[in-house]
Amino acid sequence: MMQQYMKELEQEPFDAEEFVERLAWRTIAETKSDGDEDFNPTLLHDSFVQAIKLELKCLKERSSAYLQKYYESKNHQKKQIQSGGFQDLRRDLQAVIGTRANINIAQIENYGGETFLSEELAITILQDTKHAFQRCQLLSKPEDKASNATQILDRLLNSLLIEHVDYALELGLQAIPVVEGSKNPSTLYFFTVVHQSNNITHLLEKQFTDLVVPLIVNTPKYNDCIQKKKFVLEDIERKVNTGLDRTLNAIATWVKLYLQSEQKKTDFKPETDDFDTVASPACKAVSQYITNVIKEIKSNLDGNNVTALLQEVGIRLHRVVYDHLLQFQFNTPGAMVAICDLNEYRSCTKHLGPLVAELFETLHALCNLLLVKPENLQQVCSEDSLVNLDRSVLHNFIQLRSDFKTQKQNFLKV
């Protein structure tokens, strides 16, 4: 009978009530064939209990088979992932050494952009557990429903979230570049990993609400299930946040190294006035890169996550550009180029929130200190955009003027 049971589990479309009815009639028929004409409810109950036990075994085997088939289709052998502790320390050291030396010393495998996440696989697994929860509802005694549902949920959390989503996040974390060569933008796939993992967890959350909660509500198992799901999802969220932070670091690091490599001193201190006052090539390349990053974020994240992440991109970009400008000297034509650069940065970050807009507006005003006549500096420093800044910040920018040494006495009055 159990072989027939397993065969019927695979039938599509699956009708839980029809399945239970067939199981009941089959049990009664087998009782009669044994010479017992009286209906035996105990035997029927035992048959249902046996069916539930087999349910859990089948569910485990089938989900494992689905996962194995998926990874084989990707020519991927699942590996043991080492994360946290020493691994994170080593990565941090690689980042520091690589950034200072402008080299990439970390061995990064990005699998060609493969995320190892499949919504189709997730739907298949969820369809299986959906049928399992329906059979749990119909086959279980009232006092056993919550316990049986909890076991099915455990299998679902393990196969879909731990074995699939969590594993993909671990691979995605390892694929984030520590530091890239300065002329090539970082190739980043983690935003896509986040997008797909979010979609899968949303599907699981819906099944939990629709099918699990009715089986466990008002029972001691309810809080247990809530806590189990919360524990797994919080671990996933932690890895998502870690990956997003590392991705933003990779973005900022590439911008920093690119500007160091490609921004010429003559961009801000040209030896002739015969040139076009436009944004520098280095700035334009960074602006285009940041624009592409913004598009990636908007296409892969949603809600408050987008707002917070875009703001953080803007804040980190501002820090890099601010520190970068402090490395140069500016004559009057070069100061005009710097202002053109700031206009370009402001343009590409204008949708990253009011805080980012304010930061770049203030930096634009600081760049004006490189251009105005010495006698007008005090007035400019008193304007709204600069009046609240620490005097040391103003002086740091004024000292970047190529005429600072000759006009030092006038500048010190500011």
Image (spheres, rainbow, N blue to C red):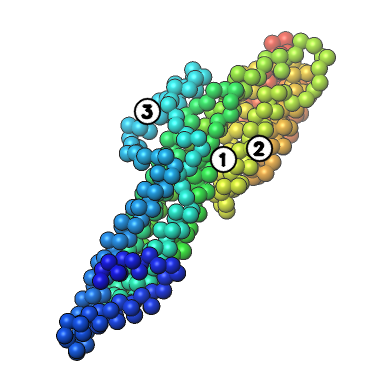
**Is 371 or 318 nearer to us in this picture?**
318
Mark 3, residue position: 90
Instruction: Confirm or deny contact between disc 1 and disc 3 (CB under 8 A).
Output: no
* Residue in the image at 56% along x and 27% along y: 254
Q: Secondary structure at mark 1?
A: helix
Measured in 3D between alpha carbons, the distance from the residue under mark 1 to the one under mark 3, in whole angstroms, is: 25 Å
Measured in 3D between alpha carbons, the distance from the residue under mark 1 to the one under mark 2, in whole angstroms, is: 14 Å
Q: Secondary structure at mark 2?
A: helix
* Residue in the image at 64% along x and 45% along y: 353
Q: Earlier in the sequence, mark 1 or mark 3?
A: 3
Amino acid type, residue under disc 2 in the picture = Thr
Q: Crowding at label 1, few (<14), some or many (≥20) Cα neighbours within 10 Å?
A: some
Mark 1, residue position: 312
* Residue in the image at 42% along x and 35% along y: 174
Residue 220 appears in which quarter of the rendering? Answer: bottom left
Q: Quadrant of the C terminus?
A: top right
Amino acid type, residue under disc 1 in the picture = Glu
In the rendering, at what x and y percent does residue 153 appear?
34, 62
Q: Crowding at label 3, few (<14), some or many (≥20) Cα neighbours within 10 Å?
A: few
In the rendering, at what x and y percent does residue 43 appear?
20, 80
Amino acid type, residue under disc 3 in the picture = Arg
Would you say residue 184 is visible in this rendering? yes
Residue 86 appears in which quarter of the rendering? Answer: top left
Measured in 3D between alpha carbons, the distance from the residue under mark 3 to the one under mark 2, in whole angstroms, is: 31 Å
Mark 2, residue position: 291
